Image (cartoon, coloured by chain):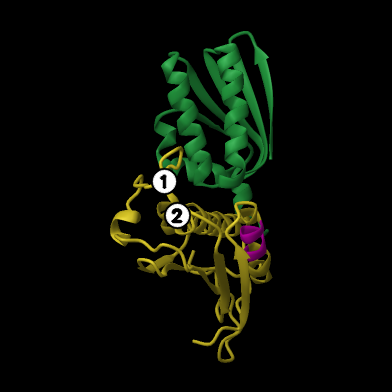
Amino acid sequence: MKAQNVLKMEILSRSSNESFARVSVAAFVSQLDPTIEEISDIKTAVSEAVTNCIVHAYKDGIGKIYITVKIFEGGTVSIKIRDTGCGIEDIHKAMEPLFTTAGGERAGLGFAVMQSFMDKVRVTSAVGRGTSVTMSKKISTQESIPASGKSEQTDGGK
Amino acid sequence: MSVRINISGEVLTAYLEGELDHHSAKDIREQIDNAIDRNAPSLLILDFRDLTFMDSSGIGLVMGRYRKMKEFKGEIHITNTSPQIYKVMKLSGLDRLARIDKGGNNSESAKRA
């Protein structure tokens, strides 16, 4: 499926960019007229993914984080957050709630939040090469873009 | 992100303001811990009325303060959580460790952003 609109950005893995990343993605998604809850869900999921890049992928330095947001017909948003950092050895384990290698006061809930707040989360990773997290969510548009001549209102299945 | 601390008897209230994430958590944690160390309260209230965003870094912060208060047999209450923040807390199971009072009206989340 071809995206109707695309945002691409590249930021350094500085923690001061966490806020910038989630707010920028939310601002781009706002053209779909999401609810406050949907926008909060997206901001929270993006914050988790970007924090993972900073805390884990580039734990020994500063690297680049690549964010791509795509909007598809019908109001589905896809957000890809990619790094070229250390990679994840065991994705299954990394995604277990409460599992963390960071220590300190990291709760180990990053992936659990992403999975709970987004419709789909897909993670691919290669040790030494980086990790890519792709998350998608259907926004419950008030007036869906009319598809193939139909103009009935949808409630996004809610 | 900032925190304002108020002490009344054995109750220490921390009013958090702004967005709590991994970037801001460290400074806020230090300020709250300093106040706990100086005052040894029996109750820590985290007031989230002016907290506009929180991710799982906030869960780490609350869990850490819960453990610290427990060392002195103190308690922790969380108050005025927005629907977004409550959702993150609920996911973590924090609602089983600490009393969480929801603030405002949850139906607000259905409004358009």
What colour do you see for chain B?
Answer: green
Q: Amino acid at mark 1?
A: Ala
Give the magenta-colored segment's residue range: A20-25
Mark sitting on residue A22:
none
Vertical order, A61 against B64 (above or below) = below
Residue labelled with disc 2? A56
Q: Nearer the viewer, residue B87 or B57?
A: B57
| Residue under the point 49% across and 27% down | B65
| Residue under the point 37% across and 47% down | A100
Q: Amino acid at mark 2?
A: His
Q: Nearer the viewer, residue B4 or B77?
A: B4
The location of residue A47, given as percent across then percent down, is 55, 55
Query: Tag 1, which secondary structure?
Result: loop
- The answer to which image quadrant residue A116 occupies is bottom left
Mark sitting on residue A102:
1
- The answer to which image quadrant residue B98 occupies is top left
Q: Share a chain, discs 2 and 1?
A: yes
Vertical order, B45 against B8 (above or below) = below
Q: Earlier in the sequence, mark 2 or mark 1?
A: 2
Instruction: Please rate how many residues cluster around mark 2, counting C-alpha atoms within 10 Å: few if below 14, some from 14 to 19, many from 20.
Output: some
Vertical order, A31 against B21 (above or below) = below
The location of residue B67, given as percent across then percent down, is 43, 25
| Residue under the point 54% across and 56% down | A41
Number of marks drawn: 2
Q: Which chain is yellow?
A: A
User: Mark 1 falls within which chain?
Assistant: A
Marks 2,1: beta carbons within 8 A: yes
